């Protein structure tokens, strides 16, 4: 697709999303679902950088969203910090945890790496679930405030109304997707892609693979933490179940089904895995059954995920053959 | 100018001595050939010089500095570039992107700086250089084609060309001619000669194709059972009874 067309389509999509509170004025549930979609798509962007671009399949990703969420909860409720400074500090805390845990996990490769990240995810979830004094345990950490109001063009802009929080989540998602594009299209992005395709070659060409992988693990974790803070500020409660193994695997599914290693993948995946079932009110017991079937179908028929299907469709409309990948 | 010195390198894999105290000096720029029967230890020697594999004992000196057992990315930063016997390229990337990846700076701080301020002029220069090199190996029509679509011989050329673009002072080419068809073979030796004329440095080639290496290299090193058996001009080496015996076993 020519760049101009992509740009126009993106602007149109953004315009629709900005107008959504008016379009769906009578249906607040639509906004609710879209906010959920954004707060799941944001951690998925972090995982896409790791899994899709660098080839690091982490099975504990949402635990880092949990670190961000609980760090912000403690700062806001117990330490009486403001929302904005808590958001920044909690994002940094999740990134720092990413460095510390990443350095250990990245000593291992492929399936060993997956198992170690899974183990760390379980440990972190267990801490959130059981450290009653700090995390309030399995009951969840309630009373998390919405963001404090800001002054915008001389007017007070409060985030209590759903539509206004929706704008915050939309802005956060736009920033994170823009950051993803910036990283992927930079020299760093090319190094990450090289590590995924052939790490031995990358090292022979001068890439300090462990350093780059640690950096992307930290960045992915920080993005997850950022999404985690938004999630708990939206739901007003931090629950351990939001950051469990099941949620981490859900995040992997979002990335793979959406299209690992494509810029739009996390958005498409979150739309399908979070927004659609939530909107259709599919019973949660059935979700994983349906997702499982979908995952098998996608790996069999569309190995590049929904984003790949969309790209091939666009090429076909443009009269070009679909891209062949090894 | 690069000076490569290998002192008494030993490396055992299980019960087999891949390197049995090999010593070697390369003092001046040139095209050097490393030949020897299968299992002579040629690739092990390359692996140790290129970094990432530590020898059991012995030393590798580059310009008088010990570089024994350094990780391969450090060796690359010191100007050592290699190709692999099994041919390694980035299959999902286009030929052009393969070269641009090889040419770009790799140290993390530098790429982070590029992330913040990208110099368009430097990018254009790299692109032009990449296209020029692709033309030299007749891959210019494939610049925008994913490398996975290339034939095996073309992949070899792409791999070799992407080591050259890094402007190293020591090239280690592990069997560059294997799997390359006769027509491309000529392109390959022309390319190596052109590159050597452009920037004389040390070109060190492991090769089994005798015709190819004897016409290209001025100095042939023959390895046998983990040590240097013979060294000299192509004529001298081919006439040596010891070499003939090693090959006929």
Image: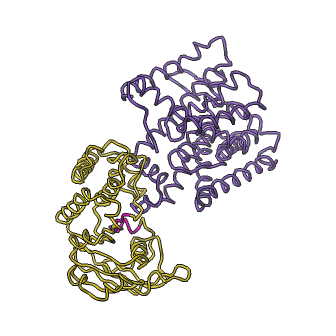
Residue B86 at x, y percent in the picture: 42, 62
Residue B241 on the magenta segment: no
Residue B203 at x, y percent in the picture: 27, 70
- Chain A on-screen colour: purple
Question: In the rendered structure, which segment of residues is drawn in magenta?
Answer: B74-83
Furthest-top residue in this view = A26
Q: Give the total number of marks visible in the rendering.
A: 0
Quarter that holds the N terminus of chain A: top left
Quarter location, residue A82: top right
State the residue at coordinates (31%, 88%). B242
Residue A172 in view of the camera: no
Quarter location, residue B233: bottom left
Residue A211 at x, y percent in the picture: 50, 59
Can you say whether B183 is above or below A317 in the image?
Answer: below
Residue A85 in view of the camera: yes
- What colour scheme does the image use? by chain
Quarter location, residue B29: bottom left
Q: Is residue A8 left or right of residue A61?
A: left
Furthest-left residue in this view = B197
Residue A92 at x, y percent in the picture: 58, 48
Q: Is residue A65 left or right of residue B67?
A: right
Residue B82 on the magenta segment: yes
* Residue nearer the viewer, B189 or A85: B189
Q: Which chain is yellow?
A: B
Q: Is residue A248 left or right of residue A220?
A: right
């Amino acid at each position: 697709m020519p760049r101009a067309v992509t740009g126009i389509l993106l602007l149109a999509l953004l315009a629709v999303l900005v107008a959504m509170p008016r379009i769906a004025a009578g249906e607040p549930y639509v906004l609710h679902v879209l906010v959920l979609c954004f707060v799941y798509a944001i951690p998925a962007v972090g995982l896409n950088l790791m899994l899709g671009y660098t080839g690091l399949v982490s099975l504990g990703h949402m635990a880092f969203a949990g670190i961000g969420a609980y760090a912000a909860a403690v700062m806001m409720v117990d330490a009486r910090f403001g929302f904005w400074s808590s958001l920044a500090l909690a994002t940094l805390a999740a990134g720092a945890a990413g460095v510390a845990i990443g350095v250990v996990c990245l000593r291992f490769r492929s399936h060993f790496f997956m198992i170690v990240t899974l183990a760390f995810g379980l440990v972190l979830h267990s801490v959130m679930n059981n450290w009653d004094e700090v995390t309030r345990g399995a009951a969840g950490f309630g009373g998390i405030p919405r963001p404090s109001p800001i002054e915008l063009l001389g007017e007070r802009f409060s985030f209590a109304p759903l539509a206004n929080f929706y704008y915050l989540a939309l802005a956060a998602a736009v920033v994170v997707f823009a950051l993803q594009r910036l990283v992927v299209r930079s020299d760093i992005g090319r190094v990450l892609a090289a590590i995924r395709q052939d790490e031995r070659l990358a090292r022979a060409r001068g890439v300090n693979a462990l350093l780059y992988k640690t950096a992307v693990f930290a960045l992915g974790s920080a993005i997850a933490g950022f999404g985690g803070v938004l999630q708990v500020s939206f739901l007003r409660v931090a629950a351990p179940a939001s950051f469990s193994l099941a949620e981490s695997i859900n995040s992997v599914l979002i990335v793979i089904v959406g299209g690992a290693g494509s810029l739009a993948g996390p958005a498409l995946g979150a739309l399908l895995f979070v927004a659609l079932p939530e909107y259709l009110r599919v019973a949660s017991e059935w979700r994983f059954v349906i997702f499982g079937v979908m995952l098998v179908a996608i790996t069999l028929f569309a190995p590049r995920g929904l984003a790949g299907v969309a790209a091939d469709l666009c090429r076909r409309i443009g009269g070009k053959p679909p891209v062949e990948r090894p | 100018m690069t000076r490569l010195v290998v002192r008494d390198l030993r490396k055992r894999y299980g019960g087999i001595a891949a390197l049995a105290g090999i010593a070697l000096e390369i003092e001046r720029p040139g095209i050097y050939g490393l030949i020897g029967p299968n299992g002579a230890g040629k690739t092990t020697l390359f692996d140790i010089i290129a970094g990432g594999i530590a020898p059991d004992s012995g030393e590798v000196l580059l310009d008088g500095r010990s570089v024994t057992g350094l990780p391969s990315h450090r060796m690359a930063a010191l100007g050592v570039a290699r190709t692999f016997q099994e041919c390694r390229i980035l299959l999902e990337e286009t030929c052009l992107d393969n070269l641009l990846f090889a040419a770009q700076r790799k140290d993390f701080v530098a790429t982070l700086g590029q992330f913040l301020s990208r110099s368009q002029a430097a990018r254009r220069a790299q692109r032009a250089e990449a296209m020029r090199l692709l033309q030299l190996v007749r891959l210019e029509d494939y610049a925008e084609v994913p490398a996975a679509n290339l034939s095996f011989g073309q992949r070899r050329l792409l791999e070799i060309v992407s080591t050259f673009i890094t402007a190293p002072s020591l090239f280690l080419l592990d069997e560059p001619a294997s799997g390359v068809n006769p027509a491309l073979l000529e392109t390959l030796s022309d390319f190596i000669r052109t590159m050597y004329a452009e920037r004389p440095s040390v070109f060190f080639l492991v090769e089994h194709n005798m015709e190819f290496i004897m016409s290209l290299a001025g100095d042939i090193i023959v390895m046998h059972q983990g040590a240097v058996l013979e060294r000299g001009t192509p004529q001298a080496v081919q006439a040596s009874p010891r070499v003939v015996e090693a090959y006929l076993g």
